[in-house]
Image (cartoon, rainbow, N blue to C red):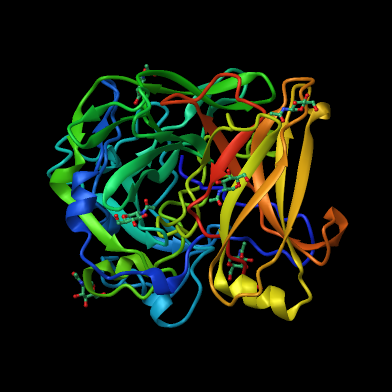
């Protein structure tokens, strides 16, 4: 299962998604050895049948390019390969709604039909499958490396009543290592539609093979998890858990075959990397005609994953925080605002910057939030702000779950003309995330807030 739902809610009308990257910071050093040093050891389930492959392995098996209705698009090359897959990009045509498709709708539940055995890929992982490493240098000495495995097939899940759901051709799953000043700092494990978390490298949950974080990839569906066991990632019909099973099967030392990609925000890859300009889906469009489609959102045969070259300009899944021991009545947010946002603010009557802390509670009707404001600095450069908000109120189980930044015409919530979109917060106390997070935290955010207008 590979769709990355990265929608970021924006509260007020001018807002556009805020992200953490500026093209000028892209340093074209060769980061290949950094990508090798930090590449994961991927461990399959002992009963895995659908292993990773290279993109080159799979491309000739795609028969055509279809739209979501299954209509074959004319004009495609007779055989797709790494240099011709981006033919639409070269013609300036957007392929983002098009699906690379094999003939038919092979359902694997649990065994693939005759003639489609190539979808099992090969068990000689490591020699035939590269790990696709998108290398993304960011401000504040950060280089984020997004490691993607590609598998020709994703086996869905068998749920009561609904039956098999979510088989699809092509599967892309990632994990991410954030390096700061050349040293691993955090690891994101990620599975399916944005389930996952960010861990400090010193968190005992993260295990290692030398410098390589160990990743357990789920049986059939390849979600990336830090441990062996059963991992619930979604509920359907409000009752049935969809579960990823991980185990101690075949090991893939991905550092032996890293495919380094210098991330280009707007495409423009060349030579053998031209295939990365294709921004459509790497598997057939899904069936939408089954009984439970309107409730579950997919059928036994579902749509392929979208291309791996996604928006990697943002922060990790979680922004890490620590307990505010200095003054437990407050949270302190230190963050930077991009030069372009400062310039926009100056031109648009903005006089204050806000920190907006979200406090979740159980029941959710008791969730609250806190706002605090400081005058904006009239500077056309990246500027650091330090804003103190109240802690989350002490009744109920409230704790800070997310924060965002606002640009405001006075020191009032109602005067904020744009807010950034939430960043999730995860507190660490020492090397572990507490089960019951503190209500007062310190966030020192290295990901610069930017806006696009
Ligand atoms: C793993 O997937 C295979 C099918 O590919 C299935 O036969 C097996 O039961 C699965 N194992 C677990 C523990 O889910
Ligand atoms: C797919 O293409 C066909 C033929 O051009 C068109 O009729 C149909 O509306 C398209 N489907 C979508 C979802 O765009
Ligand atoms: C890909 O196919 C095209 C024809 O469509 C051919 O000209 C090109 O040489 C092929 N590239 C590779 C790497 O095989
Ligand atoms: C990276 O190292 C430099 C030089 O030691 C230091 O000034 C800088 O603060 C470090 N960056 C971070 C984010 O720790
Ligand atoms: C925190 O607030 C409480 C209640 O207002 C007050 O009694 C206490 O002194 C404050 N603590 C600090 C460290 O300021
Ligand atoms: C932010 O403010 C707090 C409280 O005033 C202070 O302890 C801290 O040193 C400040 N941090 C920065 C980066 O300015």
Image quadrant of residue 25? bottom left
Q: Quadrant of ligand 4?
A: bottom left
Q: Is residue 349 left or right of residue 266?
A: right
Image quadrant of residue 441? top right
Residue at far right of view = 414
Residue 385 appears in view: yes
Q: Nearer the viewer, residue 110 or 448?
A: 448
> How far across and how far down the image is residue 207, in percent?
29, 26
Image quadrant of residue 294? top right
Q: Residue at x 82, y 67 (%)?
A: 409
Q: Quadrant of the C terminus?
A: bottom right
> How far across and how far down the image is residue 342, in percent?
63, 72
Residue 299 appears in view: no
Above or below, 303 relative to 391:
below
> How far across and how far down the image is residue 407, in percent?
73, 63
Q: Residue at x 31, y 19 (%)?
A: 247
Q: Is residue 438 left or right of residue 104?
A: right
Above or below, 311 relative to 390:
below
Q: Residue at x 36, y 72 (%)?
A: 86
Above or below, 117 relative to 405:
above
């Amino acid at each position: 299962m590979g769709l990355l739902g990265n929608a970021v809610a924006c509260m007020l009308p001018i807002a556009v998604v805020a992200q953490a990257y500026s093209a000028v910071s892209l340093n074209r050093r060769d980061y290949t050895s950094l990508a090798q040093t930090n590449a994961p050891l991927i461990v399959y389930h002992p009963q895995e049948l659908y292993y990773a492959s290279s993109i080159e392995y799979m491309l000739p098996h795609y028969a055509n390019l279809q739209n979501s209705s299954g209509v074959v698009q004319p004009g495609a090359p007779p055989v797709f390969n790494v240099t011709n897959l981006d033919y639409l990009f070269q013609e300036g045509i957007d392929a983002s709604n098009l699906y690379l498709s094999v003939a038919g709708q092979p359902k694997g539940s649990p065994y693939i039909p005759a003639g489609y055995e190539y979808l099992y890929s090969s068990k000689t992982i490591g020699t035939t499958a590269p790990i696709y490493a998108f290398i993304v240098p960011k401000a504040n000495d950060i280089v984020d490396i997004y490691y993607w495995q590609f598998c020709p097939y994703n086996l869905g899940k068998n749920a009561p009543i609904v039956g098999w759901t979510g088989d699809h051709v092509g599967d892309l799953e990632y994990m991410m290592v954030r390096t700061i000043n050349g040293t691993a700092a955090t690891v994101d494990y990620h599975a399916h539609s944005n389930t996952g978390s960010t861990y400090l490298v010193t968190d005992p949950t993260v295990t290692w093979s030398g410098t390589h974080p160990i990743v357990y990839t789920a049986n059939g569906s390849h979600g990336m998890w830090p441990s062996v066991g059963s991992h619930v990632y979604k509920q359907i019909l409000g009752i049935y858990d969809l579960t990823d099973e991980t185990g101690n099967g075949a090991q893939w030392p991905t550092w032996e075959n890293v495919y380094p990609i210098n991330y280009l925000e707007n495409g423009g890859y060349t030579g053998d990397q031209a295939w990365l300009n294709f921004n459509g889906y790497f598997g057939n469009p899904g069936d939408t005609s089954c009984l439970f489609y309107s409730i579950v959102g997919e059928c036994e045969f579902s749509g392929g994953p979208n291309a791996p070259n996604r928006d990697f300009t943002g922060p990790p899944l979680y922004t890490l925080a620590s307990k505010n021991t200095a003054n437990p009545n407050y949270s302190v947010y230190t963050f930077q605002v991009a030069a372009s946002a400062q310039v926009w603010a100056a031109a648009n009557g903005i006089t204050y910057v806000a920190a907006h802390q979200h406090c979740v509670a159980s029941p959710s009707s008791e969730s609250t939030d806190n706002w605090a404001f400081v005058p904006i600095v009239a500077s056309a450069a990246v500027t650091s702000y330090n804003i103190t908000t109240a802690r989350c109120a002490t009744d109920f189980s409230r704790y800070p779950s997310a924060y965002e930044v606002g640009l405001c015409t006075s020191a009032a919530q109602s005067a904020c003309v744009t807010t950034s979109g939430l960043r999730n917060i995860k507190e660490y106390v020492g090397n572990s995330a507490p089960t019951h997070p503190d209500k007062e935290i310190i966030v020192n955010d290295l990901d610069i807030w930017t806006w696009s207008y």
